[in-house]
Image (spheres, rainbow, N blue to C red):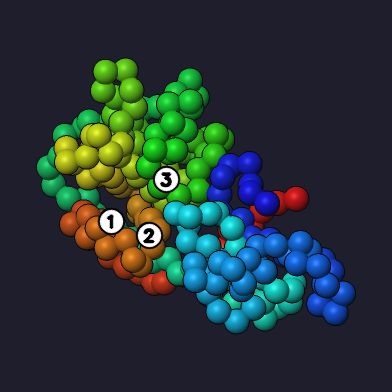
């Protein structure tokens, strides 16, 4: 029921509603509409566990209406910057495939969002090391003509307060602008701390999107 990468996954069953007489045919749905209803997020024909509790979502049946309800639960703000703020030191060094284990350890400690062992192949990732341990990271994920997405911006809890997130984000913004690209990113609307940080760096909200993660068979 959980994806190999640990990313949020939703589950549905292939049995028509009229035949779904066993709660084990669709366990996540029946848990979230039954004993775990107090933890459930969502409405209509879709339910989600809070992502800090379990990476599962479910729909009652595989219909267009149910999928619409599923998507409705995960709004994301898309923020874009048109310039790079002045100042800032170059604190991050370029990470390589040899650093994948350290990157995955940091992701496990900080949970910045969907990130797998091959995600670093999508772009440049910069990191800050302290006493041989990777304590901060930021990188590039989606790339479309004229734009590059900044992602996996994270700092180990023991290294917070040193402004690594700001410095790494600014460094990636500078690289993007120098290459003729505009940096953009996505953030949950309730992550007010991150939004404030990005606004300080010159990002402005462009629009709200709806994002859905699906587990591949």
Q: Earlier in the sequence, mark 2 or mark 3?
A: 3
Q: Earlier in the sequence, mark 1 or mark 2?
A: 2
Is residue 102 visible in the rendered image? The answer is yes
What x and y, as percent, mark residue 198? 25, 56
Horizontal placement of 148 versus 25: left or right?
A: left
Res 191 → quadrant: bottom left
Please rate how many residues cluster around mark 2, counting C-alpha atoms within 10 Å: few if below 14, some from 14 to 19, many from 20.
many
Residue nearest the observer in this picture, 106 or 165: 106
Is residue 174 visible in the rendered image? The answer is no
Res 22 → quadrant: bottom right
Q: Residue at x 61, y 73 (%)?
A: 33
Numbered disc 2: secondary structure:
strand
Single out the residue that lies furthest toward the right: 19
The numbered disc on residue 194 is: 1
Q: Residue at x 50, y 48 (%)?
A: 114
Nearest to viewer (mark 2 / mark 3): 3
Task: Say which residue label 3 marks.
Answer: 111
Q: CA distance from mark 3 to mark 1?
A: 14 Å
The numbered disc on residue 171 is: none
Residue 49 lies, with reference to residue 4, above or below; the image says below
Single out the residue that lies furthest toward the front: 35
Task: Say which residue label 2 marks.
Answer: 187
Q: Residue at x 39, y 38 (%)?
A: 109
What x and y, as percent, mark residue 151? 40, 47
Q: CA distance from mark 2 to mark 3?
A: 13 Å
What x and y, as percent, mark residue 59? 67, 70
Q: Are marks 1 and 2 in contact (CB under 8 Å)?
A: yes
Number of marks in picture? 3
Numbered disc 3: secondary structure:
loop
Residue 40 lies, with reference to residue 198, above or below; the image says below
Nearest to viewer (mark 3 / mark 1): 3
Res 160 → quadrant: top left
């Amino acid at each position: 029921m959980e994806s190999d990468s640990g990313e949020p996954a939703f589950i549905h069953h292939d049995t028509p509603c009229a035949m779904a007489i066993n709660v084990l045919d669709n366990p996540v749905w029946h848990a979230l509409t039954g004993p775990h209803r107090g933890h459930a997020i969502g409405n209509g024909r879709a339910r989600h566990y809070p992502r800090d509790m379990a990476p599962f979502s479910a729909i009652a049946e595989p219909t267009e209406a149910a999928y619409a309800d599923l998507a409705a639960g995960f709004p994301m703000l898309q923020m874009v910057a048109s310039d790079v703020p002045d100042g800032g030191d170059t604190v991050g060094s370029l990470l390589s495939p040899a650093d994948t284990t350290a990157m995955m350890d940091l992701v496990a400690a900080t949970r910045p969002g969907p990130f797998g062992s091959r995600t670093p192949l999508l772009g440049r990732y910069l990191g800050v090391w302290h006493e041989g341990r990777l304590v901060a990271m930021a990188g590039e994920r989606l790339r479309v003509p004229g734009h590059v997405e900044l992602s996996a911006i994270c700092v180990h809890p023991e290294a917070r307060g040193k402004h690594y997130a700001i410095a790494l984000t600014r460094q990636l913004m500078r690289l993007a602008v120098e290459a003729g690209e505009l940096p953009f990113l996505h953030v949950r609307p309730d992550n007010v701390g991150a939004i404030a940080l990005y606004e300080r760096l010159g990002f402005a909200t462009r629009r709200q999107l709806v994002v859905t993660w699906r587990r591949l068979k």
